[in-house]
């Protein structure tokens, strides 16, 4: 089995470091990734979308749609955690590699919630 994620995006806010219940600290930040595709009826499209890596190329192809997805990133490894906290800043374009973790927690209103986190 494999659980591996690779993301390239922009940092949403400066990372924060948290320590809960005497456990090891964790650095947390959000990362935005964007998907762009051309809409239209061209026979080259599959499911109405063509995926491209550069906006410059897309500009010549027709109507462009974009979707931004926000990811919660948690860094536990001591060396990487500290470097991330010190040097990663809001707006920076970074590459993150890690695994997906699905968890549950109870919010302040005692409601059970689900959370998806990338463990880097």
Image (cartoon, rainbow, N blue to C red):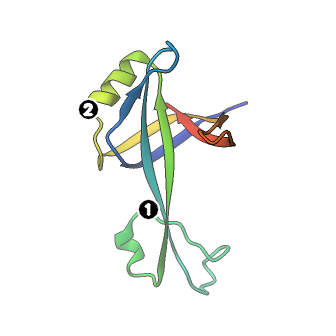
Measured as percent of width and height from the top left, residue 89 is found at: 28, 41
Give the residue furthest to the right: 1
Query: Quadrant of the image for the N terminus?
Result: top right
- Label 1 or label 2, whichever lies nearer to me, is 2
Tally of numbered discs? 2
Of residue 3 and residue 45, the one placed in the foreground of this image is: 3
Q: Position of residue 90 (x, y in %)?
A: 30, 46
In this figure, which residue is indicated by the disc labeled 2?
A: 87
Task: Say if 83 sits above or below 115 in the image.
Answer: above
Q: Residues within 10 Å of mark 1 (few under 14, many from 20)?
A: few
**Residue placed farthest to the bottom in the image?**
41
Tell me the residue at 59%/73% (across/down): 49
Location of residue 20 with respect to 73 vertically, above or below:
above
Furthest-top residue in this view: 22
- Residue 64's tag is none
The percent position of residue 52, horizontal first and vertical second, equals: 48, 66
Q: Quadrant of residue 28?
A: top left
Residue 35: x and y in percent read 50, 62
> At x 47% / y 83%, what residue is drawn?
63
Q: Say whether residue 98 is left or right of residue 26.
A: right
The span from disc 1 to disc 2 (Cα, nearest Å) is: 27 Å
**Residue visible at 56% across and 40% down in the picture:** 5
- Crowding near the residue tagged with mark 2, few <14, some 14–19, many ≥20 C-alpha atoms within 10 Å: few
Residue at x-position 47% and y-position 15%: 24
Give left or right: position of 37 versus 44.
left
Q: Which residue is nearer to you in this view: 87 or 7?
A: 87
Q: Which residue is mark 1?
A: 53
Secondary element at tag 2: helix
Q: Secondary structure at mark 1?
A: loop
């Amino acid at each position: 089995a494999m659980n591996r994620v690779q993301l390239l995006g922009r940092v949403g806010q400066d990372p924060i470091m948290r320590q809960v219940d005497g456990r090891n600290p964790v650095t947390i930040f959000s990362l935005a990734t964007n998907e762009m595709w051309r809409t239209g009826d061209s026979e080259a499209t599959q499911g109405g979308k063509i995926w491209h890596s550069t906006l410059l190329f897309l500009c010549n192809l027709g109507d462009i749609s974009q979707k931004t997805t926000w990811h919660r990133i948690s860094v536990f490894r001591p060396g990487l955690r500290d470097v991330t906290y010190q040097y990663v800043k809001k707006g920076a374009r970074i590459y993150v590699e890690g695994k997906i973790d699905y968890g549950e927690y109870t919010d302040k209103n005692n409601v059970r919630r689900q959370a998806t986190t990338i463990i880097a």
